[in-house]
Every structure is written in C-alpha cells, then in structure tokens.
Image: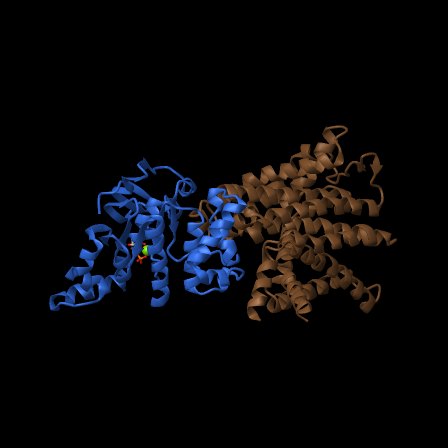
Chain colours: A blue, B brown
Amino acid sequence: MTVAPALLTLEDVDVVYGAAITAVRGVRLHVGQGEIVTLLGANGAGKTSTLRAVSNLLHAKLGRMSRGRITFDGRSTAGLPTSRLVSSGLVQVLEGRHCFRALTIEENLITGAIGRRASKAETATDLELVYALFPRLRTKRAVLAGLTSGGEQQMAAIGRALMARPRLLILDEPSMGLAPIVVAEIFLALTALNRDQGLSILLAEQNATVALKAAHRGVVLENGRVTLTGIASELSARDDIRAAYLGLNKPPSSESSRSKSIEVVA
Amino acid sequence: MSSAILERQANSQGLPGLKSFRGPFLVLLVFAVVIPQVHSDYLFDAILTPFLAISLAALGLNLLTGYAGQVSLGSAAFMAVGAFAGYNFLLRIPGLPLLAGLAFAGLTAAVIGIVFGLPSLRLRGFYLAVSTLATQFFVQWALTNISWFSNDDTSGVISPPPLHLGGFALDSPVRRYLLCLGVVAVLTFLAMRLVSGQTGRALIAVRDSELGARVLGVKVLRTKLFIFAVSSFYIGVAGALWSFAYLRTIEPDGFDLDRSFQILFVIIIGGLASIRGAFLGAAFIVVLPLLLSRAGAILLGPGFDSGLVDLVQKIFLGALIILFLRLEPAGLSALVGRLRIRRNAT
Ligand SMILES: Nc1ncnc2c1ncn2[C@@H]1O[C@H](COP(=O)(O)OP(=O)(O)OP(=O)(O)O)[C@@H](O)[C@H]1O
Ligand SMILES: [Mg+2]
C-alpha cells in the first residue's frame, strides 16, 4: 500500500484523569485515508482513554490530554467541541453502545443525523443505507432500543454513527459481549464500508483475531504505551501477539506472560 | 403479537405524527364547547381552573424531568416567579394586554430557569434536585422579603388587576376557565410539536445517555439550558394562571415546597415523558382529593373534625399512590395506552 495522507494523527499523547492517574503515555499513531487501523490492548491498556482524547470527550470524565497533539484532516483538534468534530466527519461509537433505550431503533438512527442538521430526504436515504447494511435493524425499526439484543444495539449504535456521514469512524470494542456470529456480521459490514466507500476506521479491540483480520495495520497498547505497531497480517503472525491476544500457539516460555495478561484482566 | 405491542408502545412513548393530534383535538373540543354549557361555578372555579393550571405546570416539569431527565424540586418557585412577574408587568406597564403579561411572566421565569439551570451542566440526579431546592428557598425568600415585588403592600396578599381580553372582561368563572383552556391548549400544542421533532429526540438522547448524545454532535449544554428555559416558561405561565384565574390573590405562601412536590407527583403518577400524562396526573392529584373530602363529609357527617378528615384523606391518597405505582410504574399514561391497544386489538 502506498503511503496515504494521514486523516488522523496522534503525536505523543498523554491522558491524565484527575491530577494523578496517567492512563496514556506518549501515544503516537495515525490513520491513513481509506485505512482500517486497530488499537489492541488488554483491559485498562488505555484504548478508551486514547479514543476519548481523539473525540475530545475527556473532560466529561474529569480527564484531560496533558501533552501531545491530535490532528484530523491536517487540522489540530485542540479545543474543538465534540459536535464540531462530528460535523467535520470524525464520529465515534462508544464502548458499551449507549443506545437511547426509550427511543425506537429507527429513532436512535435518526438521532445520528442531529449533528449534521440533515434534511428529511437525506435522513431517509441514509436510513435505507443503514438498513441495507444491517437488515436486522429494519425488522426491529419500531422496537424500543432498550428491548433489543446486545448485537442489535451495537448495530444500531454503528448505524447511528453512520447517519452522521463520517469520514473517520471510530469504534470502541464493538465486539464486547457479543456472540461470535454477530461479531462476524458486524465486522463484515465494517470491512464492506471500508472497501466499497473508502471509509477510514479506527477500531479499539481486545478481540485481536477478528480485529487483525479486518484491519490493515495494528497498534498494540500496554499500560498506556504503544509497544508494537505494524501491518495487521504480520502482527497476527508474531508469536508474542498470538500468545498474548490470540490465545493460540502458546510457546512454553510464554506461560508466565500469559498469566500476567490474565492478571491485568482480573 | 408481542412485537405489535412493542410497536404501539413505541408510538405512544414518543413521537406522534400529525394524526396523533386528532385525539387531543377532540378532547379540546369537549372542554371548549360542551363543558362550558354546564352551569356550575363550583365546577369551573374549584375544579377545572386549578386542574388546568396544575396540568400546565406539570407539562412544563415533564419536559424538563420526563423528557430531558433533569430532576427539579423548584417548580413552585417558577410558578411564583411567573405569578409575581405577571402581576408586576401588568401593574407597571399600563395598558399591557393580559396575554402579553402572561408571556412576560413566562419569559421572566425562563430567564430565572436558565440561571438556576446552570448547575445542571455539572450536577445530576439527586445532586441536581438538591440544587433546585436552593431555587425554591431563594425565590420564596426574595418574594417575601423584598417588598417591591408585592408593590410595597404590607398585607402580603395582593390582588391581580381585573382581567380583560381585548375589551372582554374575564369576570366569571367560565370565562376565566376559558382563558386558561386557551392558553393551555396553545402551549400543549407547541409542546407536542417540540417533543415530536428532532429536539424531542435530542432531549431523550441526553436523558438516556448524555455521553451517547454528545458523541453524536448533540450540544448537550445548550440542550439542557434550552429545556430549562422552556420548562420554566411553561411553569411560570402556569403560576400566573393559578394566581390570576384561580386564587385571584398573589402570595408567595402557596408556592412552597409542597407545591413543588405536588407537581412532581403529578408527572410521576401521570407518566414521565408523556404529554397526556401531565393532564391525567393532574386530574388524579387535583380532583381526587376533592372527591375524597366530599366522600368524607358524607360518610362522617357534618360537624366532624375537619383536621382529622384532612389527615385521613392524605393517608388514603398516599396509600392509593403507592398501590397504583406498584401496579403501574409507568403511570396513568401507560395505562391509557394499554387500554387503547386492547380496544384496537378486539
Ligand atoms: N474516568 C476515569 N477516571 C479515572 N481513571 C480512569 C478513568 N477511565 C479510565 N481510567 C483509568 O485509565 C486506565 C486506562 O483505562 P481505559 O478505559 O482507557 O482502558 P481500556 O484499554 O479501554 O480498557 P478496557 O478494555 O477495559 O475498556 C485504567 O487504568 C483506568 O483505571
Ligand atoms: Mg475501553
């Protein structure tokens, strides 16, 4: 792949919560135009914190970016409210979905068009696109989101973000708590969006198997620091990645490192 | 079958299309044309006028608490602001039309609402409720102690100016009732429009997940302050109607914390995030005690200790509320919605 102009860049980003807890240290990464990049890491590695920094959501969690620089489309995002980032095409699907449970699936999708001030006609076209991508949502369109399954809620959350017509879609652990078959369905949709429409995607995941299969490149976070970056296929071939994140091919010497990662989880 | 129920439920919960204005319009016709034929001052003065004023206040609170999830215990304060602002505008601007006075009453309450809504940008749930208590106590204190608000009247009880609507004197119970009905109908229609559009969805989004709303580009702070303003406007106008059309005196005492709780009970019993819930709840809370005291008087006979009757009535009402909410936590509105589905299904 030739070097695409970067859509998103993070340079030496530190994230702190309160005054004391440093969750992310010196993170550098970039997402090129048309690329899928996955951010891998165990529980507490700092994936969510990094993505919050990108969407300027940290202050809602009493955190802040204490160092570094983030640019989207060549422009610094410092000080821009989330709503501005959304209207310029940087849209995030939060960890845990955050569906509006008292709204129907369709109303949830329509809220995605709020930030864009879309016309009725545009909203209707975009709805059709989302339903084409996730046919299941069409059958549940009039059901309250709070009464749908986790997979349907995740699809609704992604569909809702697509209604904002993103140029960069950020997803925080979309596979969390979902059955493998649903995860496969969701990742199929994401890769289709990337392939057919050139949508750039930044994807935080613990499920490295699916994430590395879908992504072009991967970035591995450990304790808030980037420890590895590389082409997805090369990363998934590496023994340490396989041992730590894919649960495969456990070499005898990695026994201790595996149990260490389990320790982080607990 | 169950999915059909869910669909209906979704419709009734949320966002009505134009068709759904038909039912409310028929109800309005009955209240505007049929009921005024009844010749009973008691019906208008003691039941329907306070019912409308409380309904409007509850509607205002439901926009804030039911739709946008911002808990407030300051409703009575905003009613008081509306009542006193309306009084002062009509008093100090000679020739100001009554409707303009009511609008100014609402606008004043809206401004105060924005100021006291500022804590909501940081506080949620119980903490926000406690901060709205400050509104309640501060406003009552200011209105009691700053005599300018009551035109330096030392009695503390002041009368509103005579009510005119374009040369038409509103001097009978029916006419005052019709004034309330007109104002409430217009504001209800506007509220239905508001909640059925993108704004309504944004409000519910902020309530269900503030972060989820923010991440979609909803301007959460602006949305919150906006709904504080709108809600306070409604409650302010309700306070003005309560004082001008129902009590026909203006005093801070009636707008105490009990009143705030009353409005909160109305929306909880009627149904949160429901326009008709405000009316159903108000009917329950305003009309039922009247019926109970009638029943009490008949059962116990005259000459019985009225304090005791009052107490028994309160206990009875409280028990009824608990029992009802146990059976129907989503309020009267959900009950009515379900009855309708059953009727349509058969
Ligand atoms: N709101 C917060 N306040 C204080 N500390 C926080 C907050 N959110 C996260 N942290 C801390 O920051 C570190 C990184 O957490 P983060 O949520 O970014 O990790 P993650 O990689 O997303 O983990 P997971 O896979 O469990 O979602 C953790 O040590 C966590 O305890
Ligand atoms: Mg996370």
Q: Is any atom of residue B290 visible in this view?
A: yes
Identify the residue at image location x=52%, y=58%: A104
Identify the residue at image location x=30%, y=48%: A50
Identify the residue at image location x=42%, y=39%: A84
Please identify the residue farthest to the right as the structure is shown.
Answer: B39
Quadrant location of residue B304? bottom right
Question: If the image is split into quadrants, where does the N terminus of chain B sit?
Answer: bottom right
Image coordinates of residue B15 in percent, x first then y, are 59, 53
Identify the residue at image location x=34%, y=37%: A78
Relative to B268, is A96 on the left or the right?
left
Instruction: Count the numbered circles shown.
Output: 0
Query: Closer to the camera, B75 or B57?
Result: B57
Relative to B147, is A39 on the left or the right?
left
Relative to A198, is B40 on the left or the right?
right
Image coordinates of residue B86 in percent, x first then y, are 70, 37
Question: If the image is split into quadrants, where does the C terminus of chain B sit?
Answer: bottom right
Image coordinates of residue B196 in percent, x first then y, are 59, 50
Image coordinates of residue B140 in percent, x first then y, are 63, 42
Q: Quadrant of ligand 1?
A: bottom left
From this view, report whether residue B135 is shown above or below residue B47. Answer: above
